Amino acid sequence: MESLGVLLITANIGSVCDEPEEIEKLWLQEFYKTVQDHQSAFIALHLQEFGGKNYQENMGCAENFIRRLIQSEEMSQYNCVQSFIDKDFTQAERFTALASVYFIHSCLHNARIYDFQEKSFVSVSGSTMWMGSLEDCPTVHKERFPQDFWLEFAWTRKGFMRTRWLVNDQTFDLVNLHLFHDASNLVSGDCSPSVYSANRRRALYHVLTRLKDDDNAPFFLFGDFNFRLDLKSLIQAQGWTSSDTRDLDVQTAVYEQNGEVQLVMKCKQFEHQNAKVFQDENEHMLLRFDHEPMPFLNELTEVQISFPPTYPFSENVTKPSEFMGTRCPAWCDRVFMSHTARPLLQKSKLGEAFVQYGRIGGDVCMGDHKPVFLHFEMEPKFDHLEN
Ligand SMILES: *[C@@H]1O[C@H](CO)[C@@H](O)[C@H](O)[C@H]1NC(C)=O
């Protein structure tokens, strides 16, 4: 059996839905380019914030966007497409705004999806679009975080959604995820780890526990984890001092070094005055403060990151690689996998790079998040017998 090219993509499209037209065109262009670059037989696209912030108004646009994508000339070789779109925002207790779309190339004949009700795999063919709250869809398992999960915050539109696949005799789960964001920079910088990070940790443990409840399959967990840098550690490591002007009324924190202002921070403002640490060549330095995956390394693994942060980028199409002065740059968008899934990634032979983990649209505006992809050749199951 031949190895199989797999492309996993995660994209928070909130601002694509809020600002359609121009950004949408650029987004699709970069997406198609990535698809063409890799020529994968199986593509999984996990979207978050489907419909954007004003989902009541923009859900129709988002739906058209996804239809255009699926029916495009560029994707015409993928004649089987399975889509799961959680778009019923009237179900406040259930709405996650997650959308997962799976493209199967015409050369791939043996892809099957799991029916969670019948507990068996079923064949897929043609295009199937599941839309609504997805409660009745047997081939997807969706959960929104319970409203009372964390009392201080409303868990709006956050949860996870899973499908299970049998492709080339390999079984694996694909899990789309959206975790809670940081509400205030001032609170984020208060302690290490921040309360938001502790909150996400609880939520991610919850997801991993739920995945384990059902019979375990190797899984790929990719979505918007909202992982942020450990702000307090980062500020301390720079040797910046707070000039003690933190005015409780205007809620501003100013950090200085040698009498020069390095960072001005408010609830939703993060002005880093071009401090060296946030310049491009320092991205690997910033990775040292990416602490949030650490508690999960027993269960999850990730290919080494070698790309700049994925958030928050300017939504002005003339400034595609500029950070927006709202949040500390961070690697929010990630592809993790279980340790049992890692062996599915084929080892490099003859020095060929079979595994690629990267960011899409570094110099093109794709909204405030840059999508992230993992491309690999999936190890054939009975490779060792053939050798
Ligand atoms: C985008 O940036 C350019 C250059 O700074 C500016 O002239 C333009 O007004 C901005 N556009 C929007 C929509 O803010």
Image (spheres, rainbow, N blue to C red):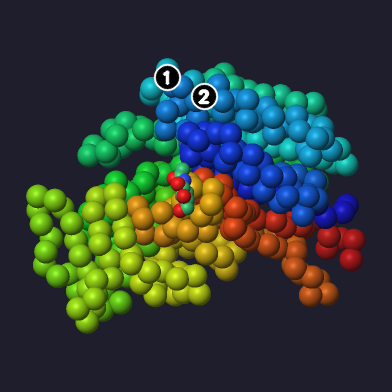
Q: Residue at x 56, y 65 (%)?
A: 307
SS label for mark 2: helix
Q: Secondary structure at mark 1?
A: loop
Horizontally, residue 178 falls left or right of residue 6, namely left
Pick the residue in front: 82 or 35: 35
Label 2 CA crowd tier, 10 Å (few <14, some 14–19, many 20+): many
Say which amino acid is labelled 1. Gln
Toward which corner of the image does residue 304 lie, by quadrant? bottom right
Farthest-out residue, bottom: 258
Q: Alpha carbon of mark 1 to alpha carbon of mark 2: how far?
A: 14 Å
Residue 259 place in picture, x, y as percent: 19, 78
**Residue position for label 2:** 59
What x and y, as percent, mark residue 368?
48, 48
Name the residue: 28% across, 71% down. 262
Q: Quadrant of the C terminus?
A: bottom right
Q: Looking at this view, is 231 or 139 the one in front?
A: 231
Is residue 288 depicted above or below 376 in this figure? below
Quadrant in which residue 116 is drawn: top right
In this view, the mark in front (1 or 2): 2
The structure residue drawn at horizontal position 69% and vertical position 29%, both measured from the top left corner, is: 68
Residue 293 percent coordinates (x, y): 44, 60
Q: Residue at x 90, y 61 (%)?
A: 386
Disc 1, ligand 1: is the CB inside 8 Å?
A: no
Neighbor class of circle 1 (other Cα within 10 Å; few <14, some 14-19, many 20+) is few
Quadrant of residue 75 within the rendered picture: top right
Q: Name the amino acid, label 2.
A: Met
Q: Which residue in the structure is indicated by mark 1?
A: 91
**219 relative to 323, above or below:** above
Query: Horizontally, is 276 left or right of 361 in the view?
Result: left
